[in-house]
Amino acid sequence: MQITSKWRRGVIAAAAAVAVAGTSFGLAAPAMADPIGSPVYRDLAGGGSDTIQDVMNGLGAVVTDGSGTLLIGSYDATGSATIKTKSTGATFTRPDGSGDGFTAFKAAKTSTAYKGTTLSPTDLQFSRSSSGPSNTTPTGTYVYVPLALDAVDYATAPSTAVPGDIPLGTSVGELSSDGVTLALTLKNIYSRSATTTLKDAAGVTHTVGAQGSGADIIPFIPQAGSGTRSFWQSQMGGAFGSIASATFTYTTNATDCATNPTVAGVAPSFNSSTNVCTVGVQEHNGTVTAKVTNAIVPFSIAQWVAQSNSSSIASDYGITVTDRRNSAVLGKVNGVNPTVGSPAVLNTGFPIVRPVFNIVKYDELSTNANLAAVFQGASAKAYTALNPVTLGSLVIEDFGFGDITGGVNINGVTYTAGDTTSAYLRTNG
């Protein structure tokens, strides 16, 4: 991965004006799962990915049109069961995750049903995605517009048998130096379907297995439809082993069980006979590492940074980033730290990096001036908006992401913020 632009600390005066204007709107009360402040219903509404929900809320607090009216209404992946994005629009199930968000977005643009409710084209103008298109065509109806750079690491509890530095690995089934035992790599951890012994470079053995096996490493994955889950799967060799679970259990009471989030539409389940609570793994939420001994789970580094910056974000932006880390810490991969500096920022040299996106309908960029002004081109408002208090950093940086307005090369493909012309970003779904 090669960054081809510097991290921008100053932008044109127009972008600064956007940020300053935002200090007058929507900052009086903390924003929770939905936009708060005036106007309640924004011109540009979207939902989907958990990964970029906080940065989009940050942009929603500062990005305005020429008259100073806030433009972006971004709806979190979790919260109330339903959302309403326009005053005369439909009330529909809250999209949870990149896949869910795109499904809802396409339903709106085709005036079809999403989870039982028929949507209209005005209900949604974008959807958030932490993964790129799976099928591309140069004339696709939709375009994945690059927003920023993220990286994905593994998270664990602060005290655990899981090593604090694990190689990514070159292939599934890679052997250790003895030529017999499987090597301790992330790819081998996430491809197992039974309790397995793995050996690290120092010759120390570790077991990997499902919850309840007593293994040293217990792998988990986020909910179905998560862009982070599909990205992590692609990095782990293309398929998860059966021991990698999207649910976990722990012993508690009914009241505590009910405090867990509903994940991808499935509420936590309590068994009163055994006092066991079953919970879905919500992406970028460290509850599983707190509840399951030796758990390991993928976690967006940008999300981890944003959650650790929740106090300063509340002060500067007037919005709430919920710290869901539950004391989870990030490991090293191939000896590389996930963050650098103090306060911590994303290490753009981390081995597992990815662009994150907002999806829009391509032809609407020429008919909706606000949509184009926010998302189209590297100088668009989403990529140049500044911290509303200091004007000293980009919004995307404050929320843990890397600036890609000058382009970033990942595995031979260049992604540039605001790019809507490259064929590999277009899709029909």
Image (spheres, helix red, strand yellow):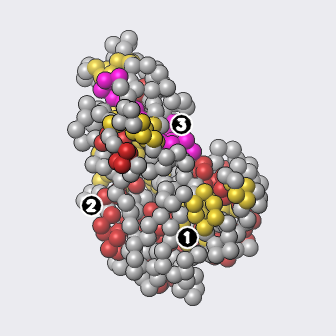
Q: Is 49 within the magenta?
A: no
Q: Dot 2, crowdedness within 10 Å: few (<14), some or many (≥20)? A: few
Where's residue 10, x and y in %?
41, 74
Q: Is residue 92 left or right of residue 329?
A: right
- Residue bounds of the magenta highlight: 213-233
* Residue positioned 76% across, 56% down in the render: 112
The span from disc 2 to disc 1 (Cα, nearest Å) is 29 Å
Among numbered discs 2 and 1, the one appearing first in the sequence? 1
Q: Which residue is mark 2?
A: 343
Could you classify mark 1 by the number of other residues whose Cα lies within 10 Å: few (under 14), some (14-19), or many (20 or more)? Answer: many
Which amino acid, by three-letter code, is at mark 3?
Ser
Could you tell me which residue is drawn at 59 percent across and 75 percent down?
Answer: 42
Circle 1 sits on which residue?
73
Q: Quadrant of residue 82?
A: bottom right
Q: Residue at x 66, y 62 (%)?
A: 360
Above or below — where is 182 with respect to 97? above
Residue that numbered label 3 is attached to: 234
Q: Are the residues flagged by discs 3 and 2 in contact, CB closer than 8 Å?
A: no
Q: Label 2 sits on what residue type?
A: Pro
Marks 3 and 2, the one that precedes in the sequence: 3
